[in-house]
Image (cartoon, rainbow, N blue to C red):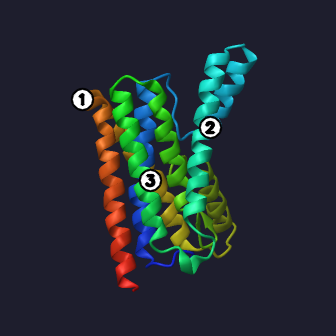
Amino acid sequence: MKHTIAQQRDWIYRAVGLLSFNGGLVSMVTFVSFIHNSVGYVTGNISFAADAFANGNILAFKSFMLALLAFLFGSIVSGVIIPIDNAERGSNYNIALIFEIICIICGGIGLKAGFDSARYFLAIAMGIQNALTTYYGKSIIRTTHMTGTMTDLGIILGHWIRGNAVEKWRIVVYLSLLTGFFVGSVVGAIAYKFIGYGTLIISVLLCMIMLRFSHADILKNT
């Protein structure tokens, strides 16, 4: 497996499991809590924004556009923090995760206090997370939405059916992403029924666990 992460290979497998679970959880919390809109679902938000614009619902249009811009801002933040040079990435992942944790905490506190606009903090967090593990080897890894992952899985399975040699680790990664996102969504939906926005505490804990794993991997390589 070709690395684009300077740490151990284990880092990406942990990221695949924990962060896809987290992506599903946060997406479900925002989906079931207000206007049935997931902050990590860029494709859907573009469609919702277009529908609102076409029907002259300017307030809804602005809301969806702000969610899109917040996600974009989070991706930009991650791009600024994590350099292109693989050898220099190391602890920069920790910095990005800390920013994500801060955004999730701010979003959770704001939403619990009744400020719906606080969801934009969650959109920023998802933008940071999605950009965090985007490239690994020849794969594009997404942890906040699964359309690309399902497509990539379909492509590699199609190549396998044709009899072509495929990298089995990629199938494992794609299936892990889909499973993690699904399980995270289920947990998010169930937990929200009982503790509401307190469900986001789980998200913070997941990011902190990922932060600890990342720090441990960095220490192994110093």
- Visible in this render: residue 2? no
Q: Is residue 121 left or right of residue 139?
A: left
Q: Nearer the viewer, mark 2 or mark 3?
A: 3
Farthest residue, direction top:
56
User: Mark 3 sits on what residue?
Assistant: 99
- Amino acid type shown at disc 2: Leu
Q: Residues within 10 Å of mark 3 (few under 14, many from 20)?
A: some
The residue shown at (69%, 21%) is 51
Q: Give residue 100's position: percent from left, percent from top.
A: 44, 51
For the residues labelled 3 and 1, say whether their Cβ atoms are less than 8 Å apart: no
Q: Give residue 6's position: percent from left, percent from top.
A: 50, 79
Query: Secondary structure beneath disc 2?
Result: helix
For the residues labelled 2 and 1, say whether their Cβ atoms are less than 8 Å apart: no
Farthest residue, direction bottom:
222
Res. 68 mark? 2
Res. 194 mark? 1
Q: Give residue 92's position: percent from left, percent from top.
A: 48, 68
Q: Between residues 80 and 36, which one lies in front from this camera angle?
A: 80
Q: Give residue 95's position: percent from left, percent from top.
A: 44, 62
Which of the 4 quarters of the picture holds residue 70?
top right
Which of the 4 quarters of the picture holds residue 153?
bottom right
Farthest residue, direction right:
54
Q: Is residue 27 left or right of residue 51?
A: left
- Visible in this render: residue 132? yes
Query: Secondary structure beneath disc 3?
Result: helix
Res. 118 mark? none
Which of pointers 2 and 1 lies earlier in the amino acid sequence?
Answer: 2
- Amino acid type shown at disc 1: Phe
Which quarter of the image is occupied by the C terminus?
A: bottom left
- Amino acid type shown at disc 3: Phe
